Image: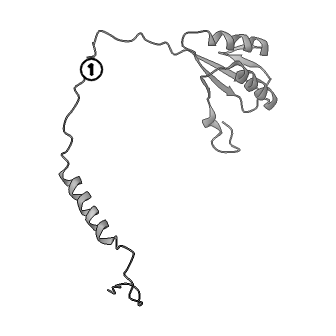
Amino acid sequence: MAMSGGKDDGSPMMEMNTTPLIDVMLVLLIMFIITIPVATHSVDIDLPVPNPNDTPPPVDPIKNKIVLTPDNQILWNGTAINEGELVSNLNASKAFAVEPELQFEPDQQASYDLSIRVLNIIKASGVTKFGFVGNEKYREFGKAA
């Protein structure tokens, strides 16, 4: 380890060596961390106890299913409707306290144009519970259900 006592011209060294100061500070920091007591205190909170007699009312899971047929029919829960009736049915289903789930299942031979129109109507209605069903039939391309 080389040490320098200043310049060759005999003037004193003006820079302070901070390495020992940093070493001492790190040792002190480690000592303080070790001596800090572990926080063992706790806050007691009284939580409510469940009452076995308090059962929530059963929610009837109402599901509305839209099926598109190959002959361009829209079926709402098995009943044929037109696009105007679809809009009114969607608005009526949103008025329930618990919005029913809307399931959409187009037939594999259904018109793509009809599918897009129905999906746009559903999107414009603001339905929040929506899902595609029957997709498992189309897992492999080119195989009929």
Where does the N terminus fall, quadrant-wise?
bottom left
Q: Is residue 36 above or below residue 136?
A: below
From the top left corner, tell me how far across and down residue 102 is, in percent. 62, 21
Where does the C terminus fall, quadrant-wise?
top right
Q: Quadrant of residue 105?
A: top right
Q: Is residue 21 above or below residue 32?
A: below
Q: Is residue 56 above or below residue 26?
A: above
Q: Quadrant of residue 135?
A: top right
Could you tell me if residue 69 is visible in this image? no
From the top left corner, tell me how far across and down residue 80 is, in percent. 73, 14
> Mark 1 highlights which residue?
47
Q: Is residue 141 above or below residue 27?
A: above
Report crowding for label 1: few under 14, some 14 to 19, many 20 or more residues within 10 A (C-alpha). Answer: few
From the top left corner, tell me how far across and down residue 103 is, in percent. 62, 23
Most foreground residue, 93 or 35: 35
Most foreground residue, 40 or 104: 40
